[in-house]
Image (tube, helix red, strand yellow):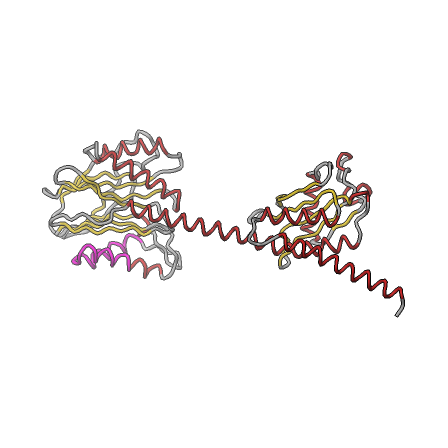
Amino acid sequence: MSLDYLTQENKELQLAVSELTVLNDVATAISSTQPVEKIIDQIVLKCIKHLNVEEGTVSLHEPGSASSQFQTMIRRQDSSSEKVPIKLDSRLTGWMLKKQTILLSNNIREDDRFNFLDESSYSFRSILCAPLLVKGNLIGYLAVFNKKGGVEFSGQDKRLLSIIASQSAQVIENARLYEEEKALLSLQEELRLARDIQLNLLPDSTPQIPGVEIAATTIPAMSVGGDYYDFLDMRSSKIGFCVGDITGKGMPAAMLMANLQATLRSQVMSVDQCDKCLESTNKLLFRSTESTKFATLFLGVLNYENNILEFANGGHDAPLLFRSEGEPELLNSTGLLLGVMEDSVYSKCEVTLGPGDLLLVYSDGITEAMDKKDEEFGLTRLIEMVKKNREKSADDIMNAILEKIKDHADGHPQSDDITLILIKKK
């Protein structure tokens, strides 16, 4: 065995030991449970140290962004050099997206790949850049600039940075996924709390009135919803009730719903007439919400001594009044949606409820419930369901309607909040 062969073997062994030392140093400095920024900072610092360079940087692809958008996460300097020119950063991104391989240039000024740089950008003599790949997908790149002392990057440097990038990519991705998971769990907990708060705002029971049956429910399409119903304490022998539907769904709609509920309750305490109550509620809602946010609202006041129902309807789906005989009546809108115009005017209507009469107030989540063929449940099916079950109790009629909607959907996800109040005169 020749001396030259042993010398070469010894060099390769020393190189392998050196690479393992660097990788061990990087591995012990980072953990996937650390914040992404801290992990990247450690990686860049170790590259500056072991590759003996003036500057290092890591840029990551932003999840959900366009394919060409990368964000520089960490940039570390070990000299007084100027920062990497923005143009160079953008060209590096484009080059990495296209080539997805390591880039080495020991003389940027004479390298045709960098002829787009102006004279002021040539303070960087050399560059070594490696892609960060996870399962073949580019998640970013790791770059170092200018070996200290004017030394050129070597093949060993190229190999070492490539190994560091290969090992670091998965750790960075795992840390990023871990942070996304924590954020998702935090959001889910916030939504759970918001749902609990919203449910606590809704009535925990229906009013008990002699000679009247009342059933009510709301089923949000998401964790929280924009539909709402309420029962309102009125003076003497009256009970107020309402169903509202906020534009949109989710958290923004739920917040506006809470605003509407609080506003309406405050107005009911000081305004006797349901039409005037809607007018003052609309004015306050208009002043406190964006121009793109509004609500529909049906407000009814039932005098259970003389059986007269007064109502005002701000753009809500017309409730159905089923008489003991004949076809159902529609209690149409008596004014605009709430929040559209500050000085909207609403009119009051009244009807008398006789024995066996039934009133159904609902949101459009019922009639617009879709099946897998995008066919709506529709008003006709709703009317048929009430007619078919009208001899049952209010609770049983409500449950029959909800069950029929579920059968109609046949597994199709609920697209809108479902709310109804059912009042039946015995």
Viewed as shown, does residue 208 lie left or right of 409?
left
Give the residue at x 14% y 47%. 209
Estimate the x, y position of residue 34 in percent, counting from the top left: 56, 51
Q: Nearer the viewer, residue 58 or 29?
A: 29
Nearer to the camera, 358 or 45: 45
Whether 81 is among the magenta residues is no
From which residue to which does the magenta span run? 378-403
Image coordinates of residue 392 in percent, x first then y, are 17, 58
Which residue is most to the left? Answer: 305
Question: Relative to the observer, which residue lies in front, 79 or 356?
Answer: 79
Q: How many marks?
A: 0
- Residue drawn at x 36%, y 51% is 221
Quarter of the image with the N terminus is bottom right
Give the image location of residue 147, x and y in percent.
Answer: 78, 45
Residue 214 shows in the view: yes
Q: Can residue 390 be found in the magenta stretch?
A: yes
The secondary structure that dominates the magenta segment is helix
Residue 367 visible (yes or no): no
> Residue extending furthest top?
343
**Viewer-side residue, 305 vs 53:** 53
Q: Residue at x 84, y 62 (%)?
A: 8
Q: Quadrant of residue 291?
A: top left
Apparent side of residue 365 relative to residue 311 in the rendered image (left or right):
right
- When asked about the image quadrant of residue 414, the answer is bottom left
- 37 w.r.t. 293: above or below: below
